[in-house]
Amino acid sequence: MRSRYVRQIKLEKLRGVEIGQKTYTVTLHNGRFRFFEPYREHTDARIASDGMRVPDPKADRISTGIPDLDTITGGLKYGSCNVLEIDHGVGKRYYQILTALASNALKNGRGVFILPSIGYQLSKRDIFVPTNVVVSSPEGEDPVAWGEGLREKWDELRERTGRPILNIIGLDSIEFAFGYKAVLNLVNLMISNWKETNDINVLVVKSGQESMNMAVHTADAYLLVNELNGGLSLYGIIPRTEPYYMLLEDRNRIRLTPIV
């Protein structure tokens, strides 16, 4: 947990009852003892039209689509670079964070550009506002030419909506396609463009990938999702926060509960 502390309970023996899982994460939040079941695996990455629209918290920030996360972070700043690190063992369960973010941005009238991380599945039929969403992947052999094409797609999407756009970028896809050195050059291009346009940007990195260390130094906000006793924990590295347990409720709504 990178120096974070959590409560857990370990079951050594239960009379007459089979122990399906020996260790559970627990919390005393609001003075109430509570344990958490393992977080369900979800492969659905659909950007949904249902659910409540979450308003932006401030004029210069956008909502993450998760009210509890907005309270923790204050929302995502215009022109900011926000890093979401996915630790080993999380699998595809982090998808709901990104789809909540993208769905809410669309509901608030923004364009969304998605460069999927490796393994992230999102088809056009899953997007309810196709004209305001662009899904792209690294292609070709020249990363510089591809990067210029990327900038054109951002400009077109921004002109379509008349406001800063949300970019969700899987750095592992770029690193796999072009290599680490190309990632450095492309991220420099991206950051300079974002500062000029006020676009809001989320870089998705996987623990252990080479470009992760570079991402740390570019981050205005840095969040980490890791596996914890069969469930998922989220906490901030920049700014530093204590761990929160992720709960997926009805209609794919996410709630974050402090582990205290």
Image (cartoon, helix red, strand yellow):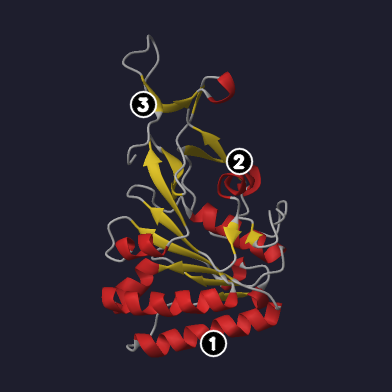
Q: Secondary structure at mark 2?
A: loop
Give the quarter of the figure containing the N terminus. Answer: top left
Q: Image point 34% across, 47% down: which residue?
A: 89
Q: Secondary structure at mark 3?
A: strand
Q: How many marks?
A: 3
Give the percent coordinates (x, y) of residue 145: 40, 90
- Tell me the kind of residue under disc 1: Glu
- Tell me the kind of residue under disc 2: Glu
Give the percent coordinates (x, y) of residue 142: 34, 89
The residue most toward the top is: 15
Q: Report which quarter residue 55 is drawn in.
A: bottom right
Does residue 212 sit above or below 24 in this rendering?
A: below
Check disc 1 and report the residue beneath it. Answer: 152
How many C-alpha atoms fall within 10 Å of the one at disc 1: few (<14), some, or many (≥20)? few
Query: Which is in the foreground here, disc 3 or disc 1?
Result: 1
Are discs 2 and 3 less than 8 Å apart at CB? no
- Tell me the kind of residue under disc 3: Thr
- Could you give the CA–CA distance between mark 2 and mark 1, rounded to whole angstroms? 38 Å
Q: Image point 72% across, 68% down: which residue?
A: 109
Check disc 3 and report the residue beneath it. Answer: 23
Give the percent coordinates (x, y) of residue 186: 38, 79
Left or right: 86, with 153 as reference point? left
Check disc 2 and report the residue beneath it. Answer: 249
